[in-house]
């Protein structure tokens, strides 16, 4: 199914929750792997697993690159064209299938997964989403075969999450092409790529006789005079992947290389990132599985005080939490990939939630596995320390998690904020006029009145064994909506400056969407396997519900009673005067 932008006129499960709305049909029933893809996915998965036997993956760490013969093998396997439609020489996987393959690659090695992900999830994603037929016919066959590798050129020294601060510029010439000048930094596949999606500031008529600056997306190829990439960066992890700066010195780019419309590049960039985050989230969902298995074997074999450390409660707690994180993370990714494949839903917030939850879950898992391994985990000959180095970047990439929390919270509040204005105006009218204003009140207003009398929307499709957990979900959707309304009434537009409150609303939304996906997955398991056969699914769903409920209760309670002002005071002191005097010298 063709890709579509993340933000559309379709419904959003997460945005609906900020209204107190529960769109059960978007997460129930839990999706299954498309029958048409199942055999192909299994064959590709088996081939990926054989790569570890056929190649010395440790060589990548030593040489800090993917060996040429390994890249060639990846081309032969079709890994560079997984998401590209068959008509252009690709495999044509659905988003669900692509995420599964990214997960398989992540279990093999994070550098391999990064190379493929930077190529398909973001590098040439704008071409898939916004490219013309002529552009696709010209470039996609080479990209599908791996003859050309793609990269995504957005980040600059002064512009990371703040894409509006770009300095790279493209000047329109009298001949109708553009002259590109500037630089990009930390570009994955920078030294390997032939095809670059590059974002630059361009000037356009403002309709008032002057000009305005906006962002435009361009296709830049390695053979264009004036283009170059810098040396490979020295990084904490992902040593086998390529990361370089890019430089543009009077690079002439033809107008037909614009992706989308001139001046609409910001939308292109955000849409690509909304789409691409799911590939990263999928990699993080399954990436640590091998490590958990290693830690399990170590815990069963390692004895202290006459007992395997696996018998100790604190070690059991770690395995319980890691397994729960893995189960929930997989449920999030599978459900959201299915939403993408349906093509009629807005999944922008859901994709961001997957990225935040799974990157943080992977970091916790890798850290805990290393702790279980003890001194062994700290030694370079084992997998633990490598995965710890490799996984740290994921919480920064494709939107730092702090920025994504603000995106989730503020985007969720946007709809209720607009509707509150309409309801407020309607409520100032005589009651008969209010009742007549059903167009205004049919969505937000009706739910607003329902919440006032204690009514909540139901989560449909949950197995009876999980009815209590469904009730928790329903209750906290209503509480999220009420908290959103309260903060909007209190702060209005100033809410954008209250990042503490926005973060708490976002974390509540993250827990709620994760809980809904988990209940969907566990419900399908209970329906197919029965209560005994799906006992572990039921247990994980109940455990996650209890933990997320405690987090949500704390986040919503602290919307009013918190330590925010004290934390700000301490931060201001450090900014102005530095750290407090060292205790040894007091």
Image: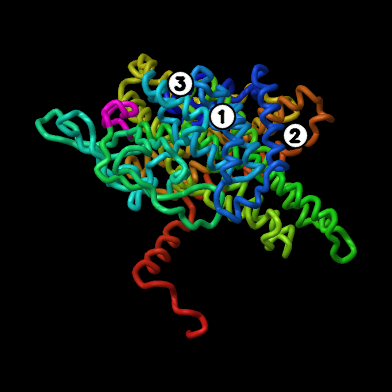
Q: From this viewpoint, which residue is outermost toward the front?
A: 69
Q: Secondary structure at mark 3?
A: loop
Quadrant assignment, res 377: bottom right
Quadrant assignment, res 290: top right
Residue nearer the viewer, 98 or 571 = 98
Q: Start and end of the magenta stretch?
A: 254-265
Residue 168 horizontal/vertical position (percent): 28, 44
Task: Identify the mark at residue 537; answer none if there is no mark.
Answer: 2
Q: Dot 2, crowdedness within 10 Å: few (<14), some or many (≥20)?
A: many
**Closer to the N terminus: mark 1 or mark 3?**
3
Q: From this viewpoint, which residue is outermost toward the bottom?
A: 585
**Closer to the N terminus: mark 1 or mark 2?**
1
Task: Identify the mark at residue 10; answer none if there is no mark.
Answer: 3
Q: Secondary structure at mark 2?
A: helix
Query: In the drawing, does residue 130 fall left or right of residue 320?
Result: left
Residue nearer the viewer, 73 or 418 = 73
Quadrant assignment, res 207: top left
The structure residue drawn at horizontal position 62% and vertical position 32%, both measured from the top left corner, is 101
**Residue designated by label 1:** 336
Residue nearer the viewer, 1 or 23 = 1
């Amino acid at each position: 199914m063709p890709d579509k932008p993340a933000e559309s006129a379709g419904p959003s499960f997460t945005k609906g929750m900020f209204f107190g709305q529960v769109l059960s049909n978007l997460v129930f029933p839990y999706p299954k792997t498309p029958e048409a893809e199942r055999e192909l996915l299994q064959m590709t998965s088996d081939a990926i697993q054989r790569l570890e036997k056929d190649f010395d993956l440790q060589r990548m760490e030593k040489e800090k690159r993917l060996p040429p013969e390994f890249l060639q093998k990846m081309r032969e396997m079709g890994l560079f064209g997984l998401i590209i439609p068959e008509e252009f020489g690709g495999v044509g996987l659905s988003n669900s299938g692509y995420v599964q393959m990214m997960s398989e690659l992540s279990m093999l090695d994070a550098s391999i997964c990064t190379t493929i992900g930077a190529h398909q999830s973001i590098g040439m994603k704008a071409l898939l989403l916004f490219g013309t037929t002529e552009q696709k016919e010209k470039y996609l066959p080479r990209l599908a075969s791996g003859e050309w590798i793609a990269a995504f050129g957005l980040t600059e020294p002064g512009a990371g999450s703040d894409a509006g601060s770009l300095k790279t510029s493209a000047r329109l010439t009298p001949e109708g092409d553009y002259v590109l000048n500037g630089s990009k930094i930390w570009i994955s596949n920078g030294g390997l790529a032939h095809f670059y999606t590059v974002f630059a500031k361009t000037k356009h008529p403002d309709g008032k006789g002057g000009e305005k600056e906006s962002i435009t997306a361009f296709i830049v190829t390695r053979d264009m005079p004036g283009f170059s990439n810098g040396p490979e960066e020295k990084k904490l992890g992902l040593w086998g992947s390529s990361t370089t700066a890019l430089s543009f010195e009077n690079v002439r780019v033809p107008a037909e290389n614009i992706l989308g419309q001139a001046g609409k590049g910001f939308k292109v960039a955000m849409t690509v990132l909304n789409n691409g985050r799911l590939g990263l989230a999928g990699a993080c969902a399954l990436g640590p599985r091998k490590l958990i298995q290693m830690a399990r074997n170590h815990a069963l074999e390692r004895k202290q005080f006459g007992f395997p450390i696996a018998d100790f409660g604190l070690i059991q707690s770690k395995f319980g939490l890691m397994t729960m994180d893995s189960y929930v993370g997989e449920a999030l990714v599978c459900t959201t990939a299915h939403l993408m494949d349906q093509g009629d839903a807005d999944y922008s917030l859901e994709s961001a939630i997957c990225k935040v939850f799974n990157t943080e879950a992977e970091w916790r898992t890798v850290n805990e596995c290393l702790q279980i391994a003890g001194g062994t985990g700290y030694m370079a000959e084992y997998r633990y320390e490598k995965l710890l180095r490799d996984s740290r970047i994921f919480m920064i990439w494709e939107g730092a998690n702090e920025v994504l929390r603000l995106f989730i919270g503020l985007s969720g509040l946007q709809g209720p904020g607009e509707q509150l204005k309409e309801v407020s105006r309607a409520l100032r009218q005589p009651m008969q006029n209010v009742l007549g204003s059903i167009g205004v009140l049919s969505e937000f207003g009706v739910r607003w009145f329902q919440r006032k009398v204690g009514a909540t929307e139901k989560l449909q499709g949950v197995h009876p064994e999980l009815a209590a957990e469904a009730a928790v979900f329903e209750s906290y959707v209503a509480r999220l909506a009420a908290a959103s309304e309260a903060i909007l009434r209190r702060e209005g537009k100033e809410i954008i400056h209250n990042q503490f409150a926005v973060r708490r609303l976002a974390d509540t939304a993250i827990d709620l969407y994760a809980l809904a996906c988990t209940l969907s997955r566990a419900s399908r398991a209970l329906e197919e396997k029965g209560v005994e056969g799906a006992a572990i699914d039921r247990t994980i769903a109940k455990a996650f519900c209890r933990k997320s409920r405690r987090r949500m209760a704390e986040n919503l309670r602290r919307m009013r009673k918190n330590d925010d002002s004290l934390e700000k005071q301490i931060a201001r002191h450090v900014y102005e005067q530095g750290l407090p005097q060292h205790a040894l010298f007091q």
